[in-house]
């Protein structure tokens, strides 16, 4: 995989008049990179909302920026959002971009054939983020815990590089960093988000105060997202070029990520916000993730989930 650029890159749409733009963060995940299409195809403007779209090389940096009030909204997972809420953040999920169905992976060195083989090994991932969560899920399913491995906390890109260099025995990474990690000779995927359906969902998450003060802007941003999905479907060639360039990978590699990311339609979004008894239901998933994060120590206090899931915008999208 081609190396992503360093630092924070900002791409701005010019605000109309004196209207303050919505500050939206996104990073290298196939379910979020379509925001680049939204911008380049002028779909924020078409929806009537000024947006400053900010790219983060480090996913955790984007979460920290939202929590610090440097962003109004960010592209992040449900698990990471609940972790932030446990730490005192006041956030709302206004849109589901996708479910990870294989693009989050635990990749291992030659000779590691089972989760049990991870015992005593060095495993790298970005601490507190979704691939750390996936690792803990896999360990728990196999009857192990974090104390059975030597956890090496590294930013996702650095974790992939450390694995390729042979500095760790396994790594938890998401696409497109999976491509990089699998360049280590003999490496294989031990398990992935495909083995834990619904456990990793990806969203547009906004500060609750901003949503309360700017519901019309949030509605237009959500509308622009679904216009983006329609544009990608109608113009697969030109939009694939935009997606691959933003990800820093070849078009062939980007197409391969499609199988591991299930983008939700508008109707699937509406269904996801409804109560249910499987991880396909966001209220159910939020409760399960909250309990799990407390159990493994990623949430020090019970997260307050009231008001977290705000379905009115997908419900109102035409």
Image (cartoon, rainbow, N blue to C red):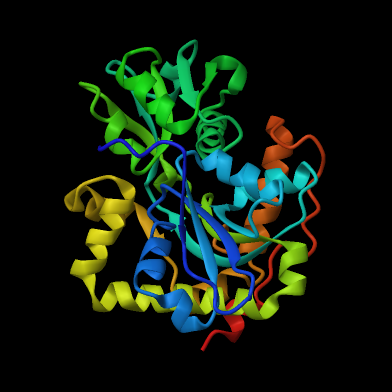
Q: Horizontal and vertical percent for residue 281?
A: 60, 64
Q: Quadrant of the N terminus?
A: top left
Tell me which residue sits at (54%, 62%) in the image.
280
Pick the residue in front: 296 or 232: 232
Q: Horizontal and vertical percent for residue 207?
A: 71, 59
Q: Horizontal and vertical percent for residue 90?
A: 77, 55
- In the rendered structure, the answer to whether residue 147 lies left or right of residue 38 reads right
Placement of 307 over or under 102, stated as above or below: below
Tell me which residue sits at (54%, 84%) in the image.
317
- In the rendered structure, the answer to whether residue 111 lies left or right of residue 225 reads left
Tell me which residue sits at (39%, 61%) in the image.
36
- In the rendered structure, the answer to whether residue 181 lies left or right of residue 11 reads left
Placement of 28 over or under 218, stated as above or below: above
Pick the residue in front: 122 or 145: 122
- Asked which quadrant contains residue 113, the reply is top left
Q: Horizontal and vertical percent for residue 86?
A: 77, 44
Pick the residue in front: 200 or 42: 42
Image mark count: 0
Placement of 40 over or under 220, stated as above or below: above
Tell me which residue sits at (80%, 45%) in the image.
88
- In the rendered structure, the answer to whether residue 1 lies left or right of residue 28 reads left
- Asked which quadrant contains residue 230, the reply is bottom left
Outermost residue, bottom side:
318
């Amino acid at each position: 995989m081609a190396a992503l650029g360093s630092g924070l890159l900002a791409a701005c749409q010019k605000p109309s008049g004196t209207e303050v733009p919505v500050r939206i963060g996104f990073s290298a995940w196939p379910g979020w990179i379509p925001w680049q299409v939204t911008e380049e195809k002028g779909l924020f403007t078409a929806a009537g909302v000024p947006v400053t779209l900010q790219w983060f090389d480090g996913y955790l940096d984007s979460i920290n920026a939202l929590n610090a009030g440097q962003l109004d909204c960010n592209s992040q997972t449900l698990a990471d959002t609940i972790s932030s809420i446990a730490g005192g953040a006041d956030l709302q999920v206004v849109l589901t971009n996708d479910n990870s169905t294989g693009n989050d992976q635990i990749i291992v060195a030659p000779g590691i054939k089972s989760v049990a083989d991870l015992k005593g090994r060095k495993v790298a991932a970005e601490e507190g983020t979704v691939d750390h969560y996936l690792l803990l899920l896999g360990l728990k399913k196999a009857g192990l815990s974090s104390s059975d491995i030597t956890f090496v906390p590294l930013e996702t890109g650095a974790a992939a590089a450390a694995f390729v260099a042979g500095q760790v025995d396994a790594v938890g990474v998401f696409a497109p960093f999976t491509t990089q990690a699998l360049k280590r000779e003999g490496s294989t995927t031990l398990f992935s988000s495909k083995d834990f359906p619904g456990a990793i969902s990806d969203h547009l998450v906004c500060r609750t105060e901003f949503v309360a003060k700017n519901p019309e802007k949030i509605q237009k941003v959500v509308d622009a997202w679904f216009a983006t999905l329609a544009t990608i479907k109608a113009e697969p060639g030109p939009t694939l070029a935009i997606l691959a360039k933003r990800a820093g990978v070849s078009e062939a590699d980007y197409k391969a990520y499609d199988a591991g990311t299930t983008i939700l339609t508008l109707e699937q979004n509406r269904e996801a916000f409804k109560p249910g008894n499987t991880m396909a239901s966001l209220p159910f998933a939020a409760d399960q993730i909250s309990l799990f994060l407390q159990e493994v120590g990623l949430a020090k206090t019970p997260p307050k989930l009231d008001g977290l899931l705000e379905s009115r915008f997908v419900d109102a999208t035409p």
